[in-house]
Amino acid sequence: MGMMLAAMQQGISPDQIKQMLDLQEQWERREAEKVFNDSLAAFKAEAVEIIKRKTVDFTSQKGRTHYKHAELSDVVEAVGPALSKHGFAWSWKTEQNSGSIRVTCILKHRQGHSDSVSLESGADQSGNKNSIQAIASTITYLQRHTLKSITGVSEKGDDTDGVAPMDTELGDSWVS
């Protein structure tokens, strides 16, 4: 404020002061983005391991499904300390519109820059969930995957992307 008053006393117009402030803000945003990118690179150099602890195993009309995945808490516990160490925090924004659930993960750096990623899906009607459980299941799923996406991490272990390899001993197929 003192600099603005001094500039006005020297005959600099309010429009010129606004232009100078706009330039300063642009410079600060670019600097914050540089720090964000450097910090994200340092985070990615950390040995973050997300272990698939949750086993899913059931038989349906489509056959047997068997795989492991990391729960949201596994992802948070794996990335949280390293993100904090490098000046990051994250939050989620959840929206619901016309039967679709949208979750946005916002990764923020202490210097002010942020980035976000969104995923959207209908409510998870699998199993015996009631309507509220179906919504909560979808939100948790989307939170897990948006946090992994924005940080560029993945779960450790085989991922067959739904292609079930044959178990040569049992003749069963399974999904990982």
Image (spheres, grey):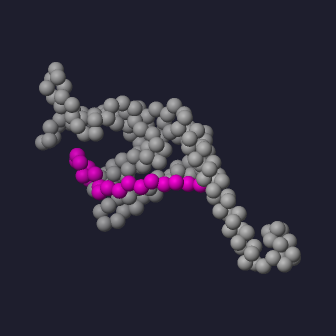
The residue positioned 67% from the left and 59% from the top of the image is 27
- Which quadrant does the C terminus fall into? top left
**Residue 117 seen from this side:** yes
Q: Is residue 59 left or right of residue 49?
A: left
Q: Is residue 108 left or right of residue 61?
A: right
Q: Which residues are magenta?
A: 112-130
Q: Measured from the top left, where is residue 134 in percent x and y? A: 29, 52
159 or 88, nearer to the observer: 159
31 or 121, nearer to the observer: 31
The residue positioned 67% from the left and 58% from the top of the image is 28
**Residue 81 seen from this side:** no
- The verdict on residue 129 being magenta is yes
Q: Is residue 110 above or below residue 55?
A: below
The residue positioned 48% from the left and 44% from the top of the image is 151
Q: Is residue 45 above or below residue 146?
A: above
Q: Measured from the top left, where is residue 81 in percent x and y? A: 56, 38
The residue positioned 18% from the left and 31% from the top of the image is 173
